[in-house]
Structures are given as structure tokens and as C-alpha cells.
Image (cartoon, rainbow, N blue to C red):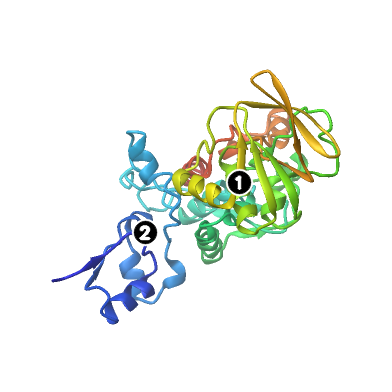
Amino acid sequence: MPIIVANGINEPLLAESAVETGVADFIGMARASLADPALPQKAAEGRFDEINYCIRCLQGCEGGILKGGPIRCMVNPTLGRESQFPQTKAAQKKKVLVIGAGPGGMEAAVAAARRGHEVTLWEKADHVGGEFIPAMFPPAKGEYAQMITFLRKQLAILNVTVVLNKQATVDEIRTFGADKVIIATGGQPNRPNIPGIETNKVIFARDVLTGKDIPEGQIVIIGGGEVGTETAAYLADCARGQVTIIEMSNHLGHGLMREFPTMRFFREQGVQSMLNAKVNAISADYVEVTINEEKKRVTANAVILAAGYHPNNQLLKELQKAKVPFVAVGDVNKCTNALDATQEGFEAGYNA
């Protein structure tokens, strides 16, 4: 009886190995084909580093189905809209400047370069990837690195000039003289107005995930959305201590596609949560919260902030004031998610 193996096999060499060793007769690649319809051809030609791999984020494909909308793909913004965005060169070659090398900015730069434009990408950090870098570290999300790896490869293939450690200013943008300016400076983590929040033991979730800060002991995470729950899973997986999540709503893991496995993991690792909880103050030894009008103290050796993001739009406002034309994409407009950022970035680059 012929056997078809599917579900999460994205790598051609792994698929080939399964067939050669007799594990299966066929390999089904559904999501991998959505991410890159040319995967079989690229694999046959040995161009493995040019494959746009599915990162199994589930945001556009499964997320689209669950919401009753069209299927989208974070790594393939043209999915389902191929006829709207034919891969043709632009009628006029332009000088394009993209500011911000997160997923939205990188996608914009790649899309513009594919259209034949001369593209330069400025990034204030010493690396590309933006907030997608800390997103790679929670359990089961290592494949997210493939998206940044693919975009970096495309930037090189398309001869995009990438300038790191570059803090853009209005004067420098004017001097550069681009025909089109795309702003993709992303978002910044929120710092709520809570008494005691300026203490040294309060750190941001992204600094924990990237290894800049390593908390131990009794750890309290303020915010139980996607970032907060994944940071908790990361810390529990590393056995850093007892983790407690404080969430102001009645639901944990808002925006999390892998909600049920994560909640099961929490039970196994002893991660605790407090819902409908408001943080009143942070002291040297504890966090004070209110639940159902009752005040409680949670022992804390470290406090991690995962209370959402706000647009990093200072440059945007300065350009508006100086009347310098630009197109803004991603979280610099409104903080949502990487799926929306890549879609907006692609469209801005394509239409440059």
C-alpha cells in the first residue's frame, strides 16, 4: 500500500531521505508549497539556499481559515494575489531608500529590487531582523530564523545596499535624494506607568529572549499575550525558576497560534498565571496586584515586561513636519504582527 507522509516536512533533503530509506513513497508538502511554489524546481537544481521555506507560523494559512478569510502567507505576500503583482520590471527605474530592516523593511527592499529599482536599506542596529530576532527563541520557533536568512540572501542576490548602525535623520534622508522613501522603523515595547517600574530588576521580554538579561528565581511576567506566554515558555524550558504570568484580561495567550500545546506545557512545567489582575506597584521583593478588588503580593526576584508595543514613529513625525514624502509600513503605523508588516512592506516596495 503506497504511503504518503505529510505535515511539517518543509526541507527537500529530509523529504528525499524519507523516500530513499523507504519510510514513505510520497511526501506531501502543502504549506511548503504555499510559501514557495517553486520549491521542487529549486531543489532539483540544487538551489536550496534560495528556497523560501515555510516557517510554520500558522498566522496566514490556518489563521486565515479560522477567521473565515482568505489564506495568506507571512513569507509569501503574493499568495492568492499573483495576478495582482506580476513579476515584471517597473516602467521607470527609481532610487529607493528603505529605513528599518525588520521583516517589513526587508520585504520592501526585496520587492523594490526585484522590480529593477536601485535600493538602499538603512538599519540603526548592527544586524537585520528587528523584533523578529527575539521571536526565534521561544520553544518550537527556531524555524523563524529561515525567513530572515532567506531575505538576507535575497538582499545580496539583488544587490541591495545594506547599511547597518545607521540612525536616519531628516537631513540625511534629504541629502540621499531618493525617489521613494519607505519608513519601516517598527515598534517599541511599552513601559506601563506603574510605581517602582524603574527598578533595576524590571527588564523587557525581548532582552530576555536574546540573552541580554538572564533572570532566575521567582520570575514575574507582566502581560500574558503572545510575547508574555512565549517568554514564560522559554524560561520554563531553560529551567530558570518559578514563572508567574500576570494578565489583566481573562484570557492567556491572545494572538498565540499554538495555544493548546503551550498551555499543556505550562501545566507540566508549573508555570502559574493570574488573570483579571491589575499590577499596582513593583517593590524590591514583590509585585502587588489587585484581583477582584483584593490586593495580593507575588514574590519576585525579576520582573519582565511584555505589555505590548507602540509605534516607533519619531522619525515619521519629523518627516511629516519637514514635509518630506514617504510611505510608512508595518508597526510604525500601528503595532499588529509580522504577517501584516510583511504584506505592507511588499506592497510598498512593489509599488515604489
Q: Secondary structure at mark 1?
A: loop
Q: Which residue is mark 1?
A: 271
Measure the alpha-carbon separation of dots 2 and 1: 38 Å
Q: Residue at x 42, y 58 (%)?
A: 54
Q: Nearer the viewer, residue 270 or 98?
A: 270
* Label whose residue precedes the other's in the sequence (2 or 1): 2
Which residue, as the protein is rendered here, is positioned at the far bottom?
A: 21
| Residue at image point 52% right, 66% down | 157
Residue identifier under label 2: 36
Query: Which percent across, then down, holds residue 85?
Result: 37, 46
Q: Classify residue 199 as left or right of residue 41.
A: right
Q: Determine the image quadrant of residue 39.
A: bottom left
For label 2, the SS is: loop
Question: Is disc 1 surrounded by few (<14), some (14 to 19) or many (20+) residues within 10 Å?
Answer: some
| Residue 343 in the image, given as x and y percentages of width and height | 47, 43
Does any portion of residue 51 appear in the rendered image? yes
**In the displayed image of the protein, which residue is found farthest to the top?**
293
Tag 2: residue type?
A: Asp
Q: Is residue 170 above or below residue 4?
A: above
Residue 129 in sight from this viewpoint: no
Q: Is residue 99 left or right of residue 158?
A: right
Residue for point 34% across, 54% down: 34
On residue 243, the disc is: none
Q: Nearer the viewer, residue 290 or 135?
A: 290
Q: Is residue 76 left or right of residue 289?
A: left
Q: Amino acid at mark 1?
A: Val
**Is 2 on the left-hand or right-hand side of 232?**
left
